[in-house]
Image (cartoon, rainbow, N blue to C red):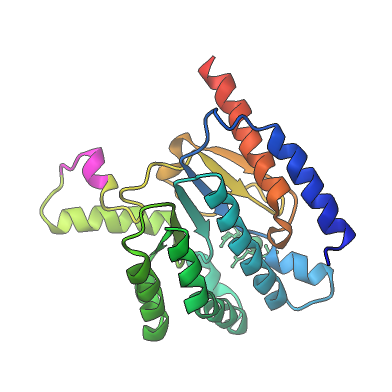
């Protein structure tokens, strides 16, 4: 049975949904910095790891919201190159969550919904088991033609740019075009994100999609990531549409 606050959220989401012009512009690519898991947990007297677990559930739900609203590309910042500096137990827990996410059940749901999965970032830093799990998820969803979900893991925008340049230079190409450069980014083939969401009230880029975000509009909410819900999702879409209308006219 649904509790009262869940019912209230559903009601608010329904009202917000009606404010969106579903024939109007929607972002082809949404990128999300899922921040605030630790604070969400600490505030309730729980260990930070409980926040990461709740955050994974919010992430699952968010993939459904995006799918339902026909978003073509979704990029989720799950683990940054800086996050290795956290206590080993926390890092290990987050990696275990990746294992827990990539189950047959999840992959079946993704395939049923025609969703393709990619892991973007410097994957080589992860242990073999984890790399294989990431590869497996990409392999079994490879032929899906609906939404693409990019999980950014061990991702940093600066390292992404440096590795792109290095790969071109290694081929003797030092007068590359913008298109050639972009083809070496982890997001090659995806349009640039038009809406970037960050939860938890922090207004920083934290190295996320530095090159790709040149024309993107940020949207911030004070809510912590595990509290992200359909109401906030529609609020972000609505803000995107209002901004778009202003810039077109
Ligand atoms: C975001 O939540 C998740 C990851 C970085 C993996 P945080 O863990 O950064 O939570 P806060 O910001 O400390 O509350
Ligand atoms: C950004 O959050 C990265 C992710 C959401 C995975 P952080 O919590 O790691 O960022 P900083 O350290 O506050 O900038
Ligand atoms: Mg944080």
Where's residue 135, x and y in %? 35, 73
In reply to whether residue 180 is colored magenta, the answer given is yes
Stretch in magenta: 175-181
- Give the percent coordinates (x, y) of residue 164: 28, 54
Above or below, 42 against 172 in this view is: below
Image quadrant occupied by the N terminus? bottom right
* Quadrant of the drawing holding the C terminus: top right
Quarter of image, res 58: bottom right
Foreground: 85 or 241?
A: 241
Ligand 2 located in image quadrant? bottom right
Residue closest to the far top: 249
Q: Is residue 172 left or right of residue 31?
A: left
Residue located at (41% from left, 41% from top): 192
Horizontal relation, residue 39 to residue 237: left or right? right
Residue 35: which quarter of the image? bottom right
Q: Tell me which residue sits at (61%, 84%) in the image.
A: 89
- Asked whether 141 falls inside the magenta stretch, the response is no
Q: Position of residue 99 (x, y in %)?
A: 50, 80
Is 153 rendered above or below residue 232?
below
Whether residue 17 is visible here, answered yes or no, is yes
Of all residues shown, which one is farthest toward the right?
Answer: 4
- Residue appearing at x 13%, y 49% in the figure: 173
> Residue, x 80% and y 51% (percent of image)?
9
Q: Is residue 221 at least partly visible in the picture?
A: no
Left or right of residue 158, residue 57 in this image:
right
């Amino acid at each position: 049975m649904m509790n009262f606050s869940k019912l209230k959220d559903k009601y608010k989401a329904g009202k917000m949904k009606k404010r969106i012009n579903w024939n109007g512009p929607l972002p082809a690519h949404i990128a999300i910095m899922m921040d605030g898991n630790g604070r969400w947990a600490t505030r309730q007297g729980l260990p930070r790891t409980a926040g990461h677990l709740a955050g994974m559930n919010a992430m699952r739900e968010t993939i459904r919201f995006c799918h339902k609203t026909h978003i073509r590309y979704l990029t989720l910042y799950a683990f940054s190159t800086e996050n290795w500096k956290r206590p080993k137990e926390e890092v290990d827990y987050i990696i275990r969550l990746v294992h827990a996410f990539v189950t047959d059940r999840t992959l079946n749901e993704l395939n049923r919904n025609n969703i393709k999965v990619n892991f973007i970032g410097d994957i080589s830093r992860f242990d073999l088991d984890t790399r294989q799990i990431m590869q497996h998820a990409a392999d079994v969803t490879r032929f899906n033609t609906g939404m693409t979900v990019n999980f950014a893991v061990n991702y940093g925008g600066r390292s992404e740019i440096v590795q792109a340049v290095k790969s071109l230079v290694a081929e003797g190409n030092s007068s590359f075009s913008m298109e050639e450069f972009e083809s070496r980014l982890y997001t090659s083939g995806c349009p640039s994100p038009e809406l970037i969401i960050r939860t938890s009230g922090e207004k920083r880029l934290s190295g996320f999609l530095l090159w790709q975000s040149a024309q993107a509009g940020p949207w911030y909410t004070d809510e912590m990531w595990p509290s992200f819900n359909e109401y906030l999702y529609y609020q972000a879409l609505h803000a995107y549409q209002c901004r778009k209308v202003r810039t077109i006219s």
